[in-house]
Image: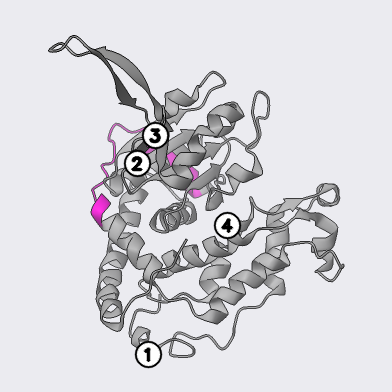
Amino acid sequence: MSEETASPEQAEADLEVVARLNKAYESLKRETSKVIIGQSDVVEQLLIAIFARGHCLLVGVPGLAKTLMIRTVADGLSLSFSRIQFTPDLMPADITGTEVIEENRSTGEREFRFLHGPIFANLVLADEINRTPPKTQSALLEAMQEHQVTIGGTRHPLHPPFFVLATQNPIEQEGTYPLPEAQLDRFMFSIHVDYPSEDEEFEIVRQTTAETTPHVDKVLDAFEVLELQRIVRRVPAADHVIRYAMKLVRLSRRDKTGGGADFVQKYVTWGAGPRASQYLVLAGKARAVLRGRYYVTTDDIRAVALPVLRHRVVTNFNAEADGITTDDVIRRLIDLLPRDESESLDGGKLPKVFRSSNAG
């Protein structure tokens, strides 16, 4: 996860692109709201992960439009979309593809030809990912990390942009295979999809029982998504912001000497690793860009802390007995580490070249 740096000239050019893409982001929110009622925070977190080159795990009960949400985002970004329904009998080749023997009609010789699987798309929906055995789940690991699949010793690259958005049902555990921590760590965000409000549910029922079907216009294309991803990597993060992200992650770990926070010592078995710090900074940068800013603040880090950390902090029996969830622990960590009050949008610690950008 190396970070690109921008020259002053490149930074000025990036500022113009950020302003343009901020308007596109507002348009994208309007387009998705035609189909998806409410869930604005979920849609924003999806887009943050996409523009930061991350993968997402969406956790929610059936019927909350998780699949429809992902498909709508793909339509608005003009990305190729593929859905894989994970079942207990799904095989790795059903995801990655397989080689078949074909006869060359001109020479009569038989040769292998690779048939691409559904993983070869820009946006891949892994529906109910915990319903398939670990062997099949692991078929996603190489694709998510290396953006390629290896079949018969031959590497097949996946065309960028590439994202895996997986869904998981949190209440039905019969016949499921929990994702191992190593695979969970490959997801930038774990996003909780909650029930809609009463007014939102009324609008959902009214809209989905009518004859008309909303149409989502294309807002960005694959080239613009890639351009935005590169700009996100070039967004400067001040040292104090990086250290803030690191401190938040390090506070989540049990201190073997007993010097950590009391509630962490009592409720946490394992804390988050260094990848969490990397994802906090990257997600903070993407959030800043979506708001029209070319700099990241500690408020951006705090805003993405829950989806980045909730699947990386493992609570113990004491937490379960006291009704303490992982989200509760993370919120306490955020309260324990106050934001940098010297940071301001009218100057403060920001480099001069960035002060003219929008204070979103």
Rate crowding at label 3 as few (under 14), some (14 to 19) or many (20 or more) other CA atoms within 10 Å: many
User: Which residue in the structure is indicated by mark 4?
Assistant: 308
Rate crowding at label 2 as few (under 14), some (14 to 19) or many (20 or more) other CA atoms within 10 Å: some
Instruction: Name the mark on residue 293.
Output: none
Q: Quadrant of residue 355?
A: bottom left
User: Which residue in the structure is indicated by mark 2?
Assistant: 158
- The x and y percentages for residue 288 are 42, 70
Q: Earlier in the sequence, mark 1 or mark 4?
A: 4
Rate crowding at label 1 as few (under 14), some (14 to 19) or many (20 or more) other CA atoms within 10 Å: few
Q: Quadrant of residue 148?
A: top left
Q: How is the image coloured?
A: one colour
Q: Earlier in the sequence, mark 3 or mark 1?
A: 3
Q: Residue at x 59, y 32 (%)?
A: 130
Q: Residue at x 85, y 59 (%)?
A: 266
Query: Where, quadrant-wise, is the C terminus in this rendering?
Result: bottom left
User: Which residue in the structure is indicated by mark 3?
Assistant: 119
Q: What stretch of residues is rendered in magenta?
A: 199-223
| Mark 2 and mark 3 residues within 8 Å of each other at the beta carbon | yes
Give above or below for 162 relative to 256. Answer: above
Q: Tell me if residue 43 is in the magenta stretch.
A: no
